Amino acid sequence: MGLISNSLRVRELMAQGMDEHVGDIAILKMDAVSMRPRAEHRPAMEAVADYAPGMDLDYLHTLPEGTFGRAVARFMGDNDIQPFVFTDEITPQMRRRNAFGIRIAQTHDLIHVLTGFDTSWPGEMGVYAVQYAQRWSLWSPILALATWLIYPVLTGFAFGKLLRAWRRGVAQGRRAPFLLAQRLEDHFEEPLQEVRQRYGLLDATA
C-alpha cells in the first residue's frame, strides 16, 4: 500500500473508532513513511519480525513483586497506558514490512521500566538517548536534535535535568545490546534486577 491508499484507509478506520484501531492506524502511518532500521540492525530485526508475544496486563498484575512483568504492569497502570495491539486489518506482509516500527511501539514502555526513566519530559529524553546511542535508524540523530530543540521549552528550560537524563540514557544505550531485537517479553516472570543485569542496565535507578 502506498501513501495515498494508506492515508485513505486511516481515515476509514478513524471513522469506525479510534479505540479499536489505534494500533492499526499507527502501523498504516508507519507503512506510509517507510520506517526502517539501519543496515547493521536489519538481520537482528528479521529474527524478531514474527515475534508477537502480546501483553496481558491482568496476568502481569498477578506476578510477584519485584518481577519485570509486575513492574511493567505497575508502570502502565500508573500512567494510564494500554498495550500496543493491532487487528487482522494489518496483514502478515505489512507486519513484516513494518517490524521495526512495530517493535519500537511494543518495547517503548518496557525500555522505560528497564532503564528506570519515568514519563516526565526528562524521562522521555532519557529513552530517546538510548535510541540515539544504539543508532536505531537513520532518523535517530534527527530525533535527538528535535528533542533538544523542543524539550527545553516543554520543561521550562530545565537543562540540568535533561542533560543528566541524556547522559545516563546514552551510557545505558552504549552498554546494552540492541534492545529492539531482544525478546524482552520472555523475561516478564524474572526478577527485574536480573533482567537489568542481563542487559547491562543495573544503574537504572541512578
Image: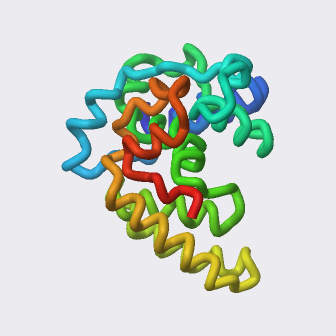
Q: Is residue 199 left or right of residue 85?
A: left
Q: How many marks?
A: 0
Residue 145 vs 182, above or below: the answer is: below
In the image shown, does 95 or 175 lie closer to the viewer? 175
Q: Position of residue 148 (x, y in %)?
A: 55, 77
Q: Position of residue 36 (x, y in %)?
A: 34, 46
Which residue is rendered at x = 46% and y = 18% of the image?
Answer: 91
Q: Position of residue 52 (x, y in %)?
A: 46, 20
Which residue is rendered at x = 64% and y = 68% of the image?
Answer: 122
Q: Does residue 9 appear anywhere in the picture? A: no
Q: Single out the residue that lies furthest toward the top.
A: 88
Q: Quadrant of the N terminus?
A: top left
In the image shown, does 50 or 65 lie closer to the viewer? 65
Q: Is residue 116 left or right of residue 73?
A: left
Q: Is residue 38 left or right of residue 202?
A: left
Q: Does residue 123 appear anywhere in the picture? A: yes
Q: Position of residue 11 (x, y in %)?
A: 68, 35
Which residue is rendered at x = 43% and y = 36% of the image?
Answer: 2
